[in-house]
């Protein structure tokens, strides 16, 4: 598969008797923005660490940017960039000091470094002095500099692990514009996030649960697959107690129930009971047909089998 | 709980170092509603929480507590106000049970009341099976629930939670909100801050904060309709455009 930037077959990672990643297989196309979602502890970060050459898989095959995972970690590391929510830049160093430190680690030639630095800072439209301390930058700018640092060595695949936690909506929107630009330039973006509106902007999404990939598709197709029934939003006509909804939550004809504050997303089974329930609900609630959000998809997929 | 607690924040200013963290913020919180203080990083949310709690003194303006409309001194209500800070001071090597025991002693709760409270809290948080587990070995969502449980040991009438769902996955977030709504059912005044704009819709009243001021308040859907936007992200993006 020549167009695959990341390819994984039956990849497993075990720590002692704990299986963190359980025989997963998938491929990411070159230039794709690939979202990697799952509950905390589902195995996302472990997978990323394997794909960055930081951790050896216990079993299975994988390649990143055309390099097999067993080709040696240095071969992989040269071709991937990594940015995590924490620990990316030194707060008490300047922008220039941080970038040149990373260039040193990456063994970039000084002339190449200066050129790359200037073009990347232009790309993120960085307009502050290069000798500004990282700790004096606003969260959004800091995050863009961290992105710049992760692509300084011109990697083919960029891994972003919860890159936008805690920054302003304006900064998040700007960051995603940069990500899409990078993808258009042919870089492959592999991103994890807990923000479902960001997941919405990915070309495809993989959902992980307990070490396995339980769903993988475009956001639109995932919604259609996971919700074959019509989804409704209920809003109480007269004030209700939250606890009063428990009867509906546990109702045998309710296929999905998710509170959004005091509004409730509900899917009913395609049964006679479900149809009766719909009529009954219409007398107590304002009922509106809606399309599922990715949050609904996430919850039903990741948690669904528990009910 | 038959009484009704309200908090009024009036024109509060607070400077921290060279930053004007609060620049004349006014808000009102009332019992029986889930209040969301929504705003991006640096908007002044934490400073506001700490000022309401009396941990910071306003440079100007006032914070007032009321029971059934009658003003209270903060000392009269202090024991009924619980706070869950953003970064929690839990002990990594103490178990859930040891934490509860520690906070029981700290708050001087009597044994019978403690037993009933402990049982109830373990039930609603579903942490019962994990009482022996050390806090350092809990998942992010469970750790937050333990923090909440410690804050709830004293049967508060008012709860302030500072970004309790930050960095927590959607499943744990939903469990946490579920818990909060069950507490609100019992008549506890809940004030929660969040930087997740999509969580704004889960509150019954939202107070949008930016640059130390309230920029909008009201029922979430009404606010969006009034501003002709479909999400709180868009609403804040517009604020930024106006400001720049």
Image (cartoon, helix red, strand yellow):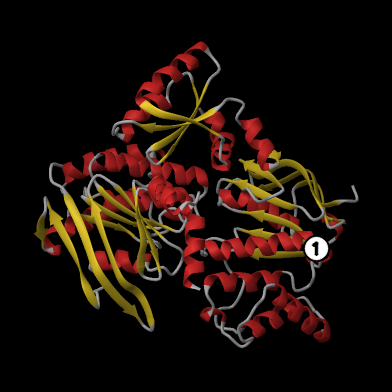
In the rendered view, tell whether residue B179 sits above or below residue A52.
Answer: above
Q: Can residue B53 be seen in this view?
A: no
Q: Which residue is drawn at 60% across and 83% down?
A: A128
Image position, residue A252 (x, y; %) = 46, 18
The chain carrying label 1 is: A
Indicate left or right for B155 with B208 as reference: left
Outermost residue toward the right in this view: A2
Residue receiving disc 1: A185
Residues B48 and B126: in front is B48
Indicate left or right for B136 with A13 as reference: left
Image position, residue A246 (x, y; %) = 37, 28
Image position, residue A92 (x, y; %) = 55, 83
Q: Which residue is drawn at 68% across and 73% down?
A: A124
Residues A13 and A37: in front is A37
Residue A293: image quadrant is top right
Q: Residue at x 27, y 68 (%)?
A: B51
Q: Can residue B115 be seen in this view?
A: yes
Q: Which residue is drawn at 73% across and 65% down?
A: A81
What is the secondary structure assignment of the residue under circle 1? loop
In the rendered view, tell whether residue A63 sits above or below residue B215.
Answer: above
Mark 1: give few (<14), some (14-19) or many (20+) Cα within 10 Å.
few
The N terminus of chain B sits in image quarter = top left
Image position, residue B133 (x, y; %) = 43, 47
Outermost residue toward the left in this view: B70
Residue A127: image quadrant is bottom right
Outermost residue toward the top in this view: A272
Give the total number of marks visible in the rendering.
1
């Amino acid at each position: 598969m020549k167009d695959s930037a990341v390819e994984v077959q039956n990849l497993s990672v075990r720590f002692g008797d704990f299986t963190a990643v359980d025989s997963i297989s998938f491929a990411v196309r070159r230039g794709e923005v690939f979202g990697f979602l799952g509950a905390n502890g589902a195995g996302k970060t472990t997978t990323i660490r394997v794909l960055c050459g930081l951790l050896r898989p216990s079993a299975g095959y994988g390649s990143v940017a055309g390099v097999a995972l067993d080709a040696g970690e240095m071969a992989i590391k040269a071709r991937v960039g990594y940015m995590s929510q924490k620990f990316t830049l030194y707060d008490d160093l300047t922008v220039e000091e941080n970038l040149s430190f990373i260039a040193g680690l990456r063994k970039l030639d000084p002339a190449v470094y200066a050129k790359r630095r200037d073009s990347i800072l232009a790309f993120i439209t960085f307009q502050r002095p290069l000798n500004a301390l990282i700790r004096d930058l606003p969260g959004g700018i800091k995050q863009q500099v961290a992105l710049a640092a992760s692509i300084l060595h011109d990697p083919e695949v960029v891994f972003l692990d919860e890159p936008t936690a805690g920054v302003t909506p304006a900064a998040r929107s700007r960051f995603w514009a940069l990500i899409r630009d990078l993808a258009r330039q042919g870089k492959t973006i592999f991103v994890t996030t807990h923000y479902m509106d960001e997941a919405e902007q990915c070309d495809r999404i993989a959902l992980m649960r307990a070490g396995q990939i339980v769903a993988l598709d475009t956001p639109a197709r995932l919604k259609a697959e996971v919700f074959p029934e019509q989804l409704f939003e209920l809003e109480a006509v007269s004030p209700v107690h939250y606890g009063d909804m428990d009867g509906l939550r546990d109702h045998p004809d309710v296929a999905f129930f998710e509170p959004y504050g005091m509004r409730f997303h509900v899917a009913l089974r395609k049964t006679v009971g479900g149809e009766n329930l719909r009529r009954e609900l219409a007398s107590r609630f304002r009922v509106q047909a809606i399309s599922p959000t990715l949050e609904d998809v996430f919850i039903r997929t990741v948690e669904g089998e528990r009910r | 709980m038959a009484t009704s607690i309200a908090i009024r924040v009036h024109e509060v200013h607070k400077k921290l170092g060279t930053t004007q963290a609060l620049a004349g913020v006014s808000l009102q919180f009332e019992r029986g509603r889930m209040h969301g203080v929504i705003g991006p990083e640096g908007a002044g949310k934490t400073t506001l929480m700490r000022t309401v709690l009396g941990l910071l003194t306003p440079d100007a303006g006032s914070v007032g507590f009321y029971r059934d409309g009658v003003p209270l001194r903060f000392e009269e209500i202090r024991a009924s106000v619980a706070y869950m800070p953003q970064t929690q001071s839990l002990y990594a090597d103490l178990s859930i049970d040891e934490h509860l025991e520690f906070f029981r002693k700290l708050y001087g709760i009597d044994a019978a009341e403690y037993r009933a409270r402990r049982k109830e809290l373990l039930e609603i948080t579903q942490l019962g099976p994990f009482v022996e587990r050390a806090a350092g070995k809990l998942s992010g969502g469970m750790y937050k629930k333990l923090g909440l449980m410690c804050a709830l040991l004293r049967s508060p009438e008012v709860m302030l939670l500072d970004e309790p769902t930050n960095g927590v996955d959607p499943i744990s977030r939903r469990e946490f909100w579920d818990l909060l709504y069950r507490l609100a059912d019992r008549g506890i005044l809940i004030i929660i801050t969040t930087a997740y704009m999509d969580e704004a819709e889960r509150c019954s009243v939202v107070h949008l904060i930016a640059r130390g001021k309230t920029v909008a308040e009201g029922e979430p859907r009404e606010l969006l309709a009034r501003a002709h936007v479909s999400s709180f992200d868009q609403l804040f993006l517009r604020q930024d455009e106006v400001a720049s």
